[in-house]
Amino acid sequence: MRADPAHLPSTSGRARACANRARSPITRARTIARASGDDVDDAARARFASVNFHGVSPEDKASAALCDLLTMSAVRVVIDQMSGSRHRSPMAPKLIDYLQQKPLRAGASAWLAELMAHEDLDHRAVALRIIETRKVLAATREGFDYDWMREETLEGLARENLELSRALAGSSFGDAPET
């Protein structure tokens, strides 16, 4: 657990500033609001109100995308389990046919709700299996490693930013007209 920066033992304030830099902008806003006695959530919302996508925060948007990804992964796991050499299930081709008729895209929860409402009991049972598999994928490190994802995301962004900056510098300095 990370120490609250307001309570760090530092006479210069350097450690406090460093700890604040390592925290997310919303966490920093909440820390500032607590220190000033303001309402924590109102202060965080007011400070970062401009960071949203049509009223949806980046965190909520990423969470929805991650839920869709986990649902898609759970479907793949269930299909692999049902079509494996040890446990061939007649439901595997039915689920594949269902996926071809109704592709799984963004809004995976609606797709899953539709599968749960299917008239065939086997389809509903598979939907429950997907829900349970999705829960396991989300809750265990073996299923989904959030720390690794964060590291990969940060490394990928750093790599992309460097490539884009190099391309900009190259086009700015390398494409100068000759006189």
Image (cartoon, grey):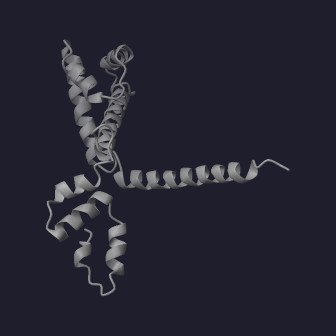
The residue that appears at 33% across and 72% down in the rendered structure is 19
Q: Is residue 49 above or below residue 9?
A: above
| The one of 81 and 24 positioned closer to us in this rendering | 24
The reply, left or right, for residue 3 in relation to residue 77 is: left
The spot of residue 5 in percent (x, y) is: 26, 73
The spot of residue 70 in percent (x, y) is: 32, 37
| The one of 99 and 173 positioned closer to us in this rendering | 173
The spot of residue 149 in percent (x, y) is: 40, 50
Q: Residue furthest bottom?
A: 11
The residue that appears at 24% across and 53% down in the rendered structure is 46
Q: Is residue 159 above or below residue 87?
A: below
| The one of 9 and 101 positioned closer to us in this rendering | 9
Q: Residue furthest right?
A: 179
Q: How many marks?
A: 0
Q: Residue furthest front?
A: 179
The spot of residue 168 in percent (x, y) is: 64, 50
Q: Is residue 106 above or below residue 170?
A: above
On-image quarter of the N terminus: bottom left
- Quarter-of-image position of residue 55: top left
- Quarter-of-image position of residue 126: top left
| The one of 135 and 157 positioned closer to us in this rendering | 157
